[in-house]
C-alpha cells in the first residue's frame, strides 16, 4: 500500500488534460495467481491506466493475496471494486465505495457501507464514493443474482440519466454505468452520451466491451474511464490491440 497516491485527484486531472483512462478488472475468483507476472506484464505494456480488483462473489482472503501479488509486478494504481466487505484490503491504493443506486435493496444502498466502516478505519485506503448503476446487458449477471436487484432497462434513458443525476446530487464523486460482467451487449452510445451531458463528475463505463471498436465507441460517447474484464479473461490477445 503506497498510501500517498491521490487516485481521484489524478483521475480528474487526467480527464481535464484529455486523457482516456482504461481499467483492467481482475476477479480474484476467476484469476490464477500464478499467472500474475505474465498477465500483468501485458497490462503494463498496454494503454491501461488502472487495475480494478473485485467480483460479486469472492472467497475471503483471495483479494488480499491477489493484490499483494499484483503489486509486485506493476506501478499502476490498484483500486478495489468490491462485491462485499470481505474484499477490503489495505494492500490496495483505493476503494470504490459503491452504492447500487439503480436498485432498491437497502443492503447495497447503505447497509454494506455501514458494515465496511470498521474495516476501512483500519486501512489507509483512499475511499471514493461511487454511484453504481446496473443496466441490462442481454443476460442475467452475477451482480443481479447477488444483490437481488433488477438492472435498469436500456431504453429507459431518461430514468438512467435521472438516477445518475441523483447520485451526483448525493455527492458521489464517480458515476459508474455497468452492463454487468460477461454482458452480451455494451451500453448504448446514446445512453452514455445522455448521462455524460448531466454530469460534472467522471463517468465510468463497463460491461460488454470486447474489442477496440467497442472501446472507441464508449470513449466517443463520453466515457471518461472504461473498464474491461471478461474480454481479457476470454482472450488475452485483446491486449495486442491496446499496446501503449
Image: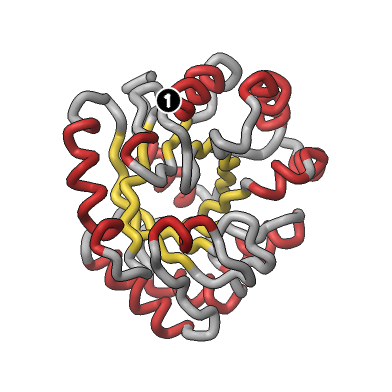
Q: Quadrant of residue 42?
A: top right
What residue is pinned by disc 1? Answer: 61
- The residue that appears at 79% across and 43% down in the rendered structure is 235
Q: Nearer the viewer, residue 203 or 152?
A: 152
Horizontal side, residue 211 vs residue 110: left or right: right
Q: Quadrant of residue 199?
A: bottom left
- The residue that appears at 30% across and 57% down in the rendered structure is 108
Q: Nearer the viewer, residue 143 or 95?
A: 143
Q: Is residue 71 visible?
A: yes
Question: Badge 1, how many Cα within 10 Å: few under 14, some, many 20+?
Answer: few
Instruction: Tell me where residue 227 appears, x and y as whole percent.
Output: 57, 50
> Of all residues shown, which one is farthest toward the top?
72
- The residue that appears at 26% across and 57% down in the rendered structure is 107
- The residue that appears at 42% across and 85% down in the rendered structure is 158
Instruction: Tell me where residue 50 appears, x and y as whole percent.
Output: 53, 37
Instruction: Tell me where residue 204 appears, x and y as whole percent.
Output: 48, 56
Amino acid at each position: 500500500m503506497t498510501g500517498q497516491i491521490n487516485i481521484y485527484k489524478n483521475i480528474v486531472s487526467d480527464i481535464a488534460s484529455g486523457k482516456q483512462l482504461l481499467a483492467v478488472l481482475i476477479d480474484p475468483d476467476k484469476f490464477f495467481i500464478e499467472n500474475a507476472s505474465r498477465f500483468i506484464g501485458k497490462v503494463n505494456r498496454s494503454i491501461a491506466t488502472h487495475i480494478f480488483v473485485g467480483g460479486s462473489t469472492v472467497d475471503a482472503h483471495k483479494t488480499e493475496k491477489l493484490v499483494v501479488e499484483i503489486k509486485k509486478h506493476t506501478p499502476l494504481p490498484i483500486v478495489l471494486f468490491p462485491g462485499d466487505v470481505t474484499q477490503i484490503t489495505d494492500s490496495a491504493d483505493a476503494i470504490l465505495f459503491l452504492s447500487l443506486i439503480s436498485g432498491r435493496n437497502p443492503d447495497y444502498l447503505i447497509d454494506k457501507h455501514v458494515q465496511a466502516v470498521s474495516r476501512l478505519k483500519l486501512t489507509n485506503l483512499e475511499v471514493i464514493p461511487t454511484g453504481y448503476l446496473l443496466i441490462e446487458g442481454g443476460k442475467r449477471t452475477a451482480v443481479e443474482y447477488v444483490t437481488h436487484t433488477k438492472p435498469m432497462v436500456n431504453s429507459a434513458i431518461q430514468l438512467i440519466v435521472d438516477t445518475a443525476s441523483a447520485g451526483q446530487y448525493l455527492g458521489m464523486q464517480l458515476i459508474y454505468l455497468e452492463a454487468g460482467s460477461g454482458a452480451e451487449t455494451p451500453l448504448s452510445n446514446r445512453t452514455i452520451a445522455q448521462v455524460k451531458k448531466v454530469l460534472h463528475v467522471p463517468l465510468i463505463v463497463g460491461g460488454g466491451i470486447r474489442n477496440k471498436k467497442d472501446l472507441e465507441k464508449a470513449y466517443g460517447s463520453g466515457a471518461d474511464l472504461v473498464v474491461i474484464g471478461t474480454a481479457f479473461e476470454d482472450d488475452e490477445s485483446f491486449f495486442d490491440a491496446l499496446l501503449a
